[in-house]
Structures are given as structure tokens and as C-alpha cells.
């Protein structure tokens, strides 16, 4: 349930999505926006991907639903966790784990290359996540620095769009 009644200047409290207060924008795409949310009781920070279903054709909407089903199957320390899915007639809200330190792409752009030990540790985390997916016949199909996020402990969290695929052994 979304609580966003009336003009912003007349609202008494923060905008809410379910049990989450919206605190800001993390990113934007063509048909979706990712917002920072905070659980009203536990104060846990989450990322909430808000997808405008009315802007999607049937094929792309079906892809989104398939990706959600796949994300529900995944439970690995180096893959972003899907916590909750909420839906209205026109909107889809995906509540996921929040990777506080953002994309490794931005980290590298701002801090330069990693030392060998840290690069090796991050590479192992990526391999661990990809191997976990492959063991479940899931491929990522969009591995890039923008989809490798860093949590508050600077550990890799794989994000993006997984797909079910038949992998040869």
C-alpha cells in the first residue's frame, strides 16, 4: 500500500510504501525508479525498486514477473536479497537489500584500482555468487561493474537481472 495523498507541501509525514518510509532516490531508469526506504519499526534501510507497469508492454511485464520469481529463489551472501513484493494496478514495488556503498564502478572511479588482495577477495565473491546461480540453472546475463554493489562492509552484492537458462555441464 502506498501512502502519498495530496500535494507534497500538504503532506504531514514522509511518503510511505507499505511499512517503509521513502528517504530519497538512489537511481532512475526508463520505467522504474529506485528509492531508499527505511522500515518504520526496525529502521532497516532497504532499496525499493518502483516499476510503472502502465509503461510496460505485455512481453516486458512478463519478463519482470519472471525475474521476480527467480530472485525469490536466490539466497546467497553475495547476491542482493529480495525481501518483499508489493503490487497495485499500475505499480510494482520490489523491496530489496540495500548496498550502502553503491556500485563498484563508482568506487573504482573515485578511489582508483584495488590492491591485489582486495581485488582477489572481490573476485572470489563474484565467482561465488555466479557459481551459486549456475548451480541453480540461473545465469545473470548482465555482469558489469554497475551491477556489482558494495554493502556496508565493502562486500560484493550482485544485482541486476537474472534469467533461467539451460546450462551445459
Image: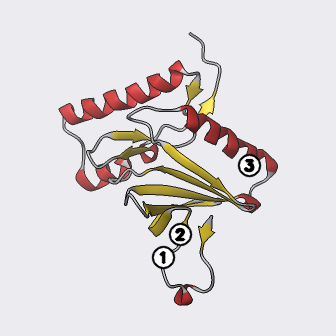
Residue 157's place in the image compared with 55, above or below, is above
Q: Secondary structure at mark 3?
A: helix
Report if the CB atoms under discs 1 and 3 are less than 8 Å apart: no
The image shows residue 36 at horizontal and vertical percentages of 45, 62
Mark 2 — residue? 16
Mark 3 — residue? 61
Q: Secondary structure at mark 2?
A: strand
> Quick one: quadrant of the C terminus?
top right
Mark 1 — residue? 14
- Looking at the image, residue 101 sits to the left or right of residue 29; the answer is left
Report if the CB atoms under discs 3 and 2 are less than 8 Å apart: no
Q: How many marks?
A: 3
For mark 3, does the 10 Å Cα neighbourhood hold few (<14), some (14 to 19), or many (20 or more) residues? some
Q: Nearer the viewer, residue 121 or 109?
A: 121
Q: How is the image coloured?
A: secondary structure
**In the image, what residue occupies the spot 24% across and 49% down?**
112
The image shows residue 64 at horizontal and vertical percentages of 67, 45
The image shows residue 84 at horizontal and vertical percentages of 55, 49
For mark 1, does the 10 Å Cα neighbourhood hold few (<14), some (14 to 19), or many (20 or more) residues? few
| Residue farthest to the top, as pictured | 169
Tell me where residue 86 sits by quadrant.
Answer: bottom right
**In the image, what residue occupies the spot 26% across and 31% down?**
121
Amino acid at each position: 500500500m502506498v501512502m502519498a495523498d495530496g500535494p507534497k507541501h500538504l503532506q504531514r509525514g514522509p511518503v510511505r510504501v507499505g511499512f517503509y518510509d521513502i528517504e530519497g532516490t538512489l537511481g532512475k531508469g526508463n520505467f522504474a525508479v529506485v528509492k531508499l526506504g527505511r522500515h518504520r519499526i526496525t529502521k532497516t534501510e532497504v532499496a525499493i525498486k518502483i516499476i510503472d507497469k502502465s509503461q510496460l508492454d505485455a512481453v516486458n511485464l512478463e519478463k519482470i514477473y519472471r525475474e521476480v520469481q527467480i530472485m525469490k529463489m536466490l539466497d546467497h551472501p553475495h547476491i542482493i536479497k529480495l525481501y518483499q513484493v508489493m503490487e497495485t494496478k499500475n505499480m510494482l514495488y520490489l523491496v530489496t537489500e540495500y548496498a550502502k556503498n553503491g556500485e563498484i564502478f563508482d568506487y573504482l572511479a573515485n578511489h582508483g584500482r584495488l590492491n591485489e588482495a582486495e581485488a582477489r577477495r572481490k573476485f572470489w565473491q563474484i565467482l561465488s555468487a555466479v557459481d551459486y546461480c549456475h548451480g541453480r540453472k540461473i545465469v545473470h546475463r548482465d555482469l558489469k561493474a554497475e551491477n556489482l554493489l558494495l554493502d556496508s562492509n565493502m562486500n560484493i552484492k550482485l544485482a541486476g537481472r537474472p534469467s533461467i537458462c539451460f546450462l551445459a555441464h
